[in-house]
Image (tube, grey):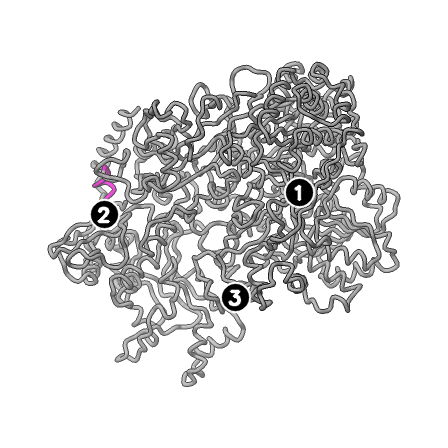
Amino acid sequence: MSISTLFENYSEFRHRHPDGDVPHNPYKWAMAIDLDACSGCNACSVACYAENNLPVVGKEKFAHGQAMHWMRIERYWDQDGREFPDRGARYLPMLCQQCEAAPCETVCPVGATNHTPDGLNSQIYNRCIGSRYCSSNCPYKVRYFNWYDYPTTDNVWPAEMNMQLNPDVTVRSKGVMEKCTFCIQRIRGAEIDAKTQGRLVRDDGELQTACQQACPTSAISFGNLVDPESKVHKQWRAQQVDLDKHEQVKDEEEGGTDLRGYRIYEFLAPYPSIMYLERVRESEI
Amino acid sequence: MHSFLRLSFLLLEFFVAGISYATDAPQSDPADPGVEGSAIDKAAKEKSDGGGSAFSAWESKYFASDPDNVGPAVKQPIEFPHFRHAGDHDKGGMEINCMYCHTYARRSLVAGIPPVQKCIGCHQSIDSVRDKPRIKKLFAYWDAKKAIPWKKVHDLPDFVRFSHERHIQRFIFQLNRPVQEVCGYCHGDVKTMTVARRQKLLSMGFCVTCHEINHPVTAPGGTPIGNQAYWYGMRKPVIGASGILKAQGPNDCSVCHK
Amino acid sequence: MLKSDFDRRDFLKVLGWGGTAVALTGCGNGMVESGKETVVSYVETSDYMIPSISVYFNSTCAQCDAGCSITGRIREGRVLKLEGNPESAINRGKTCGLGQAGVQNHYNPDRIRAPLLRTGDSGEAITWEKAYALIDEKLKGVSGNEVAFLTGGMSGHLKVLLGNYMDSIGSKNHFAYEAIGPAVVRAANKKSYGVEMPRFNISKARVVLSFGADFLGAWVSPVNFSQQYAQFRKGAGGHQRGVLVQVESKMTITGANADRWLVVRPGTEGILALGIINALGAHGVKMSGDIAAAVKGYDKDRVSKDTGVSGEQIEKIVVLLKERTPSLVLAGSAAEGYAHGSQNAAAINLLNQVLGNVGKTVEAAAVVPFPQMAPATGNTAALKALNDGLSAGKYKVLFSYGANPVFTSPAAMKFKDNMAKAGFKVVFAQYLDETALQADLVLPLDSALEDWGTQVPEYMAEGAQINIQQPLMEKLHADTRGMGNILLALVKQRRAAEYKPFDDYYGYLRAAVLQNKAALGGAHQADNDIFWNETLSKGIIKLDGAQHASLSVKSGAAGLSLPEPSAIDAQYPLQLIPSVNASLRDGRNTNQPWLQESPDPLTTIVWDSWVEIHPKKAAELGIVEGDIVEVSSKSGSLKVQAYIFPGIHPDAISIPLGRGHEAMGRYAKGYGVNPFQILDMVYDKETGELALHETRVKISKTGERVIVVKDEGPVGGNQEGQKIVPLMATDKANLSKEI
């Protein structure tokens, strides 16, 4: 939204979740991540570094919690006191959940983070003043702050390494909050192509996020949730997860209780746009 | 939690309403069915005439001094005469289409500077000017197989994604407007210049002025113009007095900011 | 994706100027500076080159030897990102994190930029002409037997060219060395199945029982296996979801994804395999008499006592294996790393045979019909042979390419000292790594994204294929050379007439491919140029009609003799497991910062090494997380931070390989420790391979403590009662309705 409309018509742009007034049309970008397929290999995370100009902060700053991995793999252990984790570990790729009622958006004093009509939680880097309220308010802790001016920091992008930077993505400077936006540069690129050709973005791999494209187990699907033919839409439907509910009422008669789909921290009602599928373990071994 | 979010949301709106630097571009009358090209020029003109509070001090300073040339005069390796190539016939120009040389504009984010090869393509068979100093310089680059180090005249910050393709597709190919007029929205009257000089602000306010003008998206009777069937990122279309459906340009931050 | 009707070489020439100019623009974080920056422009362009529009070229990933096909995204003459090439049967459009970091190998600031000749302790930059002349001079008066050429695993035309060069100097001393390759398993497979590397059909199996094969991490062809794993979990072809059981002493990423992870006493994997065969027999599974005889002594009680796996658990596995067929049993690096590694692997392979998996989930792979291009896989026995020769002063000239033995050999081997005995040492390298620092002449290589090549992957997925490697952009540094060009120049010193037609390695490759056009699927295409351009455009030569190797199943039961689990050594009570991380492997990729900062999947530690200790053992020794401990073996010791890790046998500790560089570059040097250095020189009895898991160590606190730099929070992987990653048991789940 432009600056003039931002303050005047803010409520029009703030989509709590799709309702009659502001339906997502024609796009609502969403994800489904199958945790039973995810092996925790970190390929998605490295692909994100490559695509989105993420700085490598080095050991010391990593120790200070200043790592800039928009996509991180969380690893959990079972907590039942067994001597060995003989059911393996549990992995979770954690990235911005692109909440429909995002806690981060409401607290930004300058409107640098706001909702797009296609259901993304955008971050406008040149508008950000670095108050970091958004990060404080994010339940998933997926916003990353530039404590340093990485482009001029030694050994972050030394000569030649800077030639790898993606010109479609801004290189953020000191004092700016940054986050995953479902590879918005790829989304906008695909939308521009589709618009010029007078069609919608197709669900055939025309548009993939960097993490999805790399994922060796194809655990990540990404697409247009309002397109009934898209894989993501079908997955959400099959799992009986609705974008605009914060308590999913799964239909028991139709086997709702043995469905794996869930969203993290749903009870906080941020209406996240990523559905996870529960990890599965064999009961007979 | 839910109600807390709503509360903070309300608080924000209160906060927003309380500050005064929210500005507004001059509204063009949505019902005005006038020729669109001139409407844009009019709005831009209103702005450049110092249309009030929309301007920062920085912008006003530039306008006050020289409203037609807001950019610096850039010294180019060859003083390229745009007026000779693109100017009107009656003024000694050849009226070459902008996109003949800036060939990438219709399919890329950038308009592109033509490769030396392109210049040579014509000039190798124009003997009459072969011994002019500028042409000699050109051939010197060609013979050395060196690209000409042109300086950027129209530059946008690195956090802005501007697509020449979309603008050209929309105004030239869908709305059938003259090429020089369309390019001139942002580049000014290049056909009268030698080397180009920035004439427009190219600030965010400048972009938004245009995007807030309603463009017709249907011909009278509701037939869509061009093949643009979707209006993603645009304001809801309004029906003008003549029954022409109109919409504004994209107005979501993330369309232009990367 | 790419039009094939243009000349690739012109493309590279044309981009020369733009390639460097663009680096200055478009990606800085500066503000508008009209009239200051130079705009991208070219002398000549082709139609497909449009500023701001990416073009894509296919090539082959060289970060490991799996041979995944990649597609490079190139904009304004720079390669920006690598994606998988969907046409490849190996990776089908996917990449791993290691592959993604390939661009950092290419743009690395620590690459060597000119040939360096040793003068005292420093290197002096010289010209290539001088370097070649020097090699020629040093080879004069030296017999072929006195020249040794060390390489990593090699295949394709580079291998052919190297063979011809070795031939031309009359040397047979080519040593192919891989520090962590599955050499023992290859040999065991050859015995059990008749081929070294069969195809493993994980996706068709309903149960996978893996003995330390980290197929989701660093084993053989992880991207291919990961995709198969996903299908296996989804239950392809109307099957139930596949079940994975992982048996190992230190949890790998594959173990972390298992339905049941079984910790075994280190080295007893083979005993467990025989115990399972024995129990299968008790459940009525038919097997030949010699097998039954071989496993006779391995009853459940004994096996349980030896391995630490409960009889109940063995029973469950046996029931599962019997009920759900076909299954697949894998022998991996954890099983092979012992003095009896070959026996372990043979016992595990025997299990596949008993279960009738051979021919179903263990299949013969297709074979590229050019044996001279087939991969020369590396092993550690080769390094030992070279080291023995160097030690005896047998070699006067040593070449080294694609290996870093000074870093990856045990200190007890004294490779560095022995290397010094060779009069003239030439190292071909991208970085001044530990081995290059010992050289007399260092020749800088092109990166894999600048060089031409062909590769025949060792592990073939469906069908046979030859991978094409081609430059994705103009060379970054004027004075680096591709290995192919170097070898061609060297072989021309000896056989000028024969190689005269080839100006460079590109010309050699092109001629070699066109010469065999019909065999390479180009019979229909009369025009050589079109065929060549099509081949480059695809980046893969698929050999549809290729023959499959045939499996010949032999029961290895007769020769099986597994030792009793070794008693605990009082002085060195712990077993050291040097673990292989999917990103850092043997340390060749450590100077790529994305990989340094990519958390280890098990411990989430970055930028440093650690030693994993089971909580029980740690409590016994009074060690807590962050304690700097001294780990000592008979062969050496090192100091490293402790990490308390539940996924390890209490009598074992584990330190990851790949870190601890003393050279190589700014992102590698000085981070972590190198466990290769303290390995005991114990070898597998049959193959002579270095037994990586046979080192016994003791551990003591130094009194220092640091904060471990890791990605997991202070709660260390506890969900604190939140529903973050819930777990559903299969009897509660209904996967049939899923999309």
Which range of residues does the magenta coloring cover?
Answer: A5-11
Q: Are marks 1 and 3 on the same chain?
A: yes
In the displayed structure, C12 sits above or below B250; it is below
Q: Circle 3 sits on which residue?
A: C5
Q: Nearer the viewer, residue C382 or C14?
A: C382
Q: Circle 2 sits on which residue?
A: B235
Q: Nearer the viewer, mark 1 or mark 3?
A: 1
In the displayed structure, A249 sits above or below C42; it is above
Name the kind of residue labelled 1 in the image: Ala
Name the kind of residue labelled 2 in the image: Arg
Q: Nearer the viewer, residue C630 or C300?
A: C300
Q: Nearer the viewer, residue A226 or C28?
A: A226
Q: Are marks 1 and 3 in contact (CB under 8 Å)?
A: no
Q: Which mark is residue C622?
A: none
Give how far apart the Cα atoms at labels 3 and 2 are. Answer: 45 Å
User: Disc 1: which chain?
Assistant: C
- Rate crowding at label 2 as few (under 14), some (14 to 19) or many (20 or more) other CA atoms within 10 Å: some
Task: Specify the principal SS of the magenta part.
Answer: helix
User: Disc 2: which chain?
Assistant: B
Give how far apart the Cα atoms at labels 1 and 2 are. Answer: 61 Å
Tell whether B225 sits left or right of A40: left
Q: Circle 1 sits on which residue?
A: C364
Q: Quadrant location of residue C632?
A: top right
Q: Are marks 1 and 2 on the same chain?
A: no
